[in-house]
Amino acid sequence: MDVNGRKALHDRFMRDCEERLSIATLESLGFFTAPASTKYHGAFEGGLFDHSLATAEELVDLTQKLRLEWERPESPYIIGMYHDLCKCDSYIWDIETNTYKYNPDSIYPDHAQKSIIMLQKYITLTDEEIACIRWHMGAYEKDPKMWEYYGRAIEQYPNVLYTHTADMIASKIRGI
Ligand SMILES: [Fe+2]
């Protein structure tokens, strides 16, 4: 799929969301061309969008099947589509090795918090959306001391767990 195809898919999937990022903004951030990782899932041009759409689809699906309730109904769309926005700026193409590597000029170290920082410029997030994006990595948080925060986040916002599950379905089961 090319950039225009991805743009059209974004607008179609997000059509009922009042709060969403414009195509111009997403394009300027590199959302439709960035990879989703250096070498794991979606490590190709456009992989970030493909992974984001798959995560959003899975979170909407879980919401319908499990009858999840959200502070605002569009949250599974917003969280799924934009939880990895930070990755727009995380990777650069290395012409010497023909692979993606981490961007050495990035100024925010924390993956999930960086997505929230970037998103808040464009969307006023609900507390639940902030929690879901912050903890979407689940127990993949590198520092085990973070797990107690993650546990409390699930207790307060059960959809944190389903957000992580949707992310895992997209990356580990669907392979994107
Ligand atoms: Fe993700």
Image (cartoon, rainbow, N blue to C red):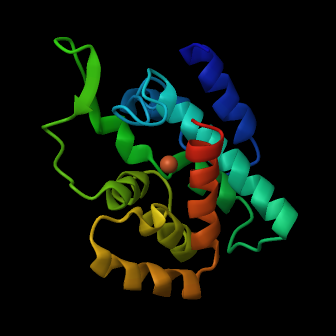
Q: Is residue 159 left or right of residue 42?
A: right
* Residue drawn at x 49%, y 24% as measured from the top left: 46
Residue 126 lies, with reference to residue 154, above or below; the image says above
Residue 96 in view: yes
In the image, 117 versus 140, the foreground residue is: 140
User: In the image, residue 154 lies at what x, y percent?
Assistant: 55, 81
Question: Residue 109: which quarter of the image?
Answer: bottom left
Q: Residue furthest left?
A: 104
Residue 16 locus on image (x, y percent)? 76, 47
- Image point (38%, 36%), residue name: 37
Q: Residue at x 54, y 33 (%)?
A: 49
- Answer with the quarter of the image where residue 172 lies: top right
Q: Residue at x 57, y 53 (%)?
A: 167
Q: Is residue 2 above or below residue 81?
A: above
Q: Position of residue 58 (x, y in %)?
A: 71, 50
Give the position of the C terminus as an image quadrant. Answer: top right
Q: Is residue 55 left or right of residue 92?
A: right
Closer to us: 11 or 108: 108
Q: Residue furthest front?
A: 173
